[in-house]
Image (tube, helix red, strand yellow):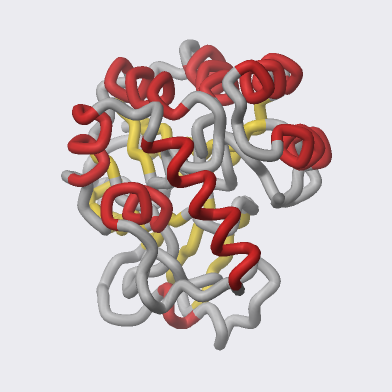
Amino acid sequence: MRIGVIGDIHGNFFALEAISRDAASLALDGWISVGDLAFKGPMPEEVLASLASLAPIAMVMGNTDEWLVRGFPASFNPGPDKLARFNKYREWALGRLTQKGIEFLSTQKTSYEMQLGNQKVLFVHSTPRSTMDWIPSSSSDQDMMPMLAGHDADIVVCGHIHTPYLRRIDGRTIINTGSVGNPFDSDPRASYLVLECEDEADSGFGATIRRVPYDVDRVVTAARERAFPWPEDYAEALRMGRGF
């Protein structure tokens, strides 16, 4: 069995398109998304339409998917200036998503489990307890423990921090897919994960982070043409592989 795992697309259709092309030769059995599909990028509806064509196994809800559907939670308090900016991104995306797209986002679950050989795999956006927990890849083993608490999965796959990694802690594995649409690790290439095993009795598994170049200028042009908020900040972030 071989599956592709994507996350943090953030309305970047051209990055998702490049990943789909890259994966065409891998004979994948399906796809899983760990969320953050449409918010804070210039092509939200195209991303949702493209995901439907991938015939995903499962869709896990990310924090920005929740924000689009339900608004910002009371606990989200980044300061008035940043909150105003986030509201602008939300309003812009909602003005371009169809009702069908909003309904698609609203039906996603916050986690998904499957068997990979004899390994139980849990897919979440951030951590098993929240879509918003921020646990950097450089965190100590102790600080990583929320990823392993409250469940018996052998492997936890997540996104959210836009930085790919693989960690082994107490005999269990944590894997971050990295970001399709806006990496934060100074590598501007789109990132996704391939998980595989030989058969149902297989006690091992393979995990490969794949990085795929794409035409950033096409995304930037789309942002400018569609009056995406602060397009020059967005362009610099994509080219540098960082947040904005």
Against 24, is 44 above or below? below
Q: Nearer the viewer, residue 198 or 238?
A: 238
Q: Is residue 58 above or below residue 48?
A: below
| Left or right: where 23 falls relative to 227 | left
129 relative to 85 in the view: left or right? left
Residue positioned 23% across, 49% down in the render: 115
Q: Residue at x 40, y 68 (%)?
A: 127
- Label count reads 0
Residue sitting farthest toward the bottom: 142
Residue 112 percent coordinates (x, y): 24, 53
- 150 w.r.t. 189: above or below: below
The location of residue 114, given as percent across then percent down, is 22, 49
Quarter of the view holding residue 211: top right
Locate the N terminus by quadrant: top left
Does residue 209 sit above or below 159 in this rendering? above
Visible residue check, residue 24: yes
- Residue 169 picture location, percent across and down: 52, 75
Which image quadrant is residue 51 in? Answer: top left
Q: Is residue 6 visible?
A: no
- The structure residue drawn at horizontal position 45% and vertical position 56%, both measured from the top left corner, is 158
Q: Is residue 98 left or right of residue 156?
A: left
| 199 or 145: nearer the viewer | 145
Position of residue 41 in the picture relative to residue 69 (left or right) = right
Q: Percent from the top left, x then y, of residue 187?
A: 77, 40
In front here: 87 or 5?
87
